[in-house]
Amino acid sequence: MQNDKNHGWKDVGLTLESSKLNFTTFKPWNEKVETMKNTAVNYLKDFDSIRDTRSNSIIFSGNPGCGKTHLSIAIANNLIRKKKKVIYMPYRDIIIGIKQNMLDSEMYNNTLNKYRKIEVLLIDDLFKGQRTQSDLNIMFEIINYRYMNNLPMIISTELTIADIIKIDEAVGSRIYEMIRSYTVEIIGIENNYRLK
């Protein structure tokens, strides 16, 4: 039974360790981080009523170490327990993998469809590091499909939504419309728990 559980988490891109991340183990250390946690909890509570609407996604943006990934995965873990199909997409790793398959059109499309069509997509560290036009094109394909089909996303990023729009207006404006009701931006080094 334990092996089945481990295999299930691996299938969605998570480790057994990350399957332990939840709202109970997340302890806010200041008011901004408390607001971030409350927004995450509210999003989860509202999920069933908003999932088929245009504004059905959530974004956590800001400083490293403020708990963006923890809360993103906490939402995903709760949705998985509710039998929702979720995939975890660590941005840098997946983008590199997708680009390596670009010459094999069948494999490329199959990989893209995995992230385009899943019920809920968790994108961790969106646009982390340097970006090429190819990276932007891939993300447009994924996000545009999800936007057109009202498929929810949970996004963590060190960038603000304004930064994302500057990087790629087509991607950024679609994300903005989808996360309009559930946007958390935490800016300031004092929010980095690792530096406390």
Image (spheres, rainbow, N blue to C red):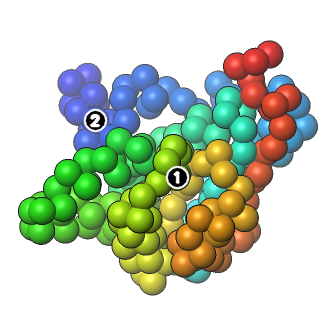
Instruction: Kindly tell me whether residue 14 is visible in this rendering.
Output: yes
Residue at the disc numbered 2? 10
Which residue is painted at 64% across and 69% down in the image? 165
Residue 116, quarter of the rendered image: bottom left
Residue 108, quarter of the rendered image: bottom left
Upstream in sequence: badge 1 or badge 2:
2
Question: How many numbered circles are shown?
Answer: 2
Q: Amino acid at mark 2?
A: Lys
Would residue 7 be found to the left or right of residue 19 on screen?
left
Disc sitting over residue 11 in the figure? none
Residue farthest toward the top in the current orientation of the protein: 196
Q: Nearer the viewer, mark 1 or mark 2?
A: 1
Secondary element at image label 2: helix
Instruction: Kindly tell me whether residue 179 is visible in this rendering.
Output: no
Q: Amino acid at mark 1?
A: Phe
Residue at the disc numbered 1? 127
How far across and how far down the image is residue 43, in percent? Answer: 66, 57
- Label 1 vs label 2: CA separation? 23 Å
Secondary element at image label 1: loop
How far across and how far down the image is residue 186, in percent? Answer: 79, 45
Which residue is painted at 37% across and 26% down in the image? 16
Q: Quadrant of the N terminus?
A: top left
Q: Quadrant of the C terminus?
A: top right
Would residue 122 be found to the left or right of residue 185 on screen?
left
How far across and how far down the image is residue 176, in percent? Answer: 65, 71
Label 1: how many residues lie within 10 Å, few (<14), some (14-19) or many (20+)?
Answer: many
| Residue 27 in the image: above or below residue 35 | above
How far across and how far down the image is residue 166, in percent? Answer: 65, 67
Asked whether the residues under the numbered discs 1 and 2 touch, taking CB atoms below 8 Å apart as contact, a structural biologist would say no
Label 2: how many residues lie within 10 Å, few (<14), some (14-19) or many (20+)?
Answer: some
